[in-house]
Amino acid sequence: MIVLFLPMINGLISVEIHRQALFLSNSSCALLRNVSFSNDASMQSCIWECQGDCHCQTTTYDHENKTCMLFSEECTENSIISGGSTRYSVICFRKDHRE
C-alpha cells in the first residue's frame, strides 16, 4: 500500500507586483511602519512582512537598500506611478481578513 503525504495548505497569498513603480498614498496615516532587512533579504521578505500584519494592504520594496514600507491603504491604478529606472517595487495585496 502506498501512502502519499501532502502538506496541508492553510491559505493562499495573492499579490500583484509593479516593478519600477512608486506608491502614492492618499493619507499620511496610511503608513504603518518601515522595515529594514539584512543584505541577503529579497522582495519575498517584504511580502511576508506585509502578510503577517493584518492591517497591511500595500507595500513598497526598495531593492537597493533592502527596506520595506507597509501601508494600510489598498493600491489602485491611480495610486501607482511608473518610475522608469526607480529601484522600488509596489506590492499590492488582496486580503480578506474574514477568511
Image (spheres, helix red, strand yellow):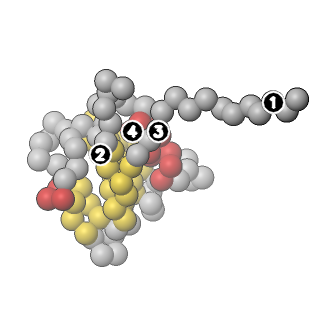
Query: Which numbered tag is attached to residue 3?
Result: 1
Q: Residues within 10 Å of mark 1 (few under 14, many from 20)?
A: few
Residue 31 visible in rendering: no
Residue drawn 22% across and 50% down? Answer: 75
Q: Please state the horizontal and vertical placement of residue 54, each as a whole percent of the image.
A: 34, 28
Report which residue position mark 3 lands on: 12
Which amino acid type corresponds to the residue marked 4 in the rendered image? Cys
User: Which mark sits nearer the N-terminus, 2 or 3?
Assistant: 3
User: Which mark sits nearer the N-terminus, 1 or 3?
Assistant: 1
Residue drawn 36% across and 54% down? Answer: 16
Labelled pair 2, 4 in contact (Cβ < 8 Å): yes
Labelled pair 1, 2 in contact (Cβ < 8 Å): no
Report which residue position mark 2 lands on: 58
Helix, strand or loop for disc 3? loop
Residue 20 visible in rendering: yes
Query: Which numbered tag is attached to residue 50?
Result: 4
Labelled pair 1, 3 in contact (Cβ < 8 Å): no
Labelled pair 3, 4 in contact (Cβ < 8 Å): no
Helix, strand or loop for disc 4? helix
Distance CA(mark 2)–CA(mark 4): 8 Å
* Viewer-nearest residue: 54 or 8: 8
Q: Nearer the viewer, mark 4 or mark 1?
A: 1
User: Which mark sits nearer the N-terminus, 1 or 2?
Assistant: 1
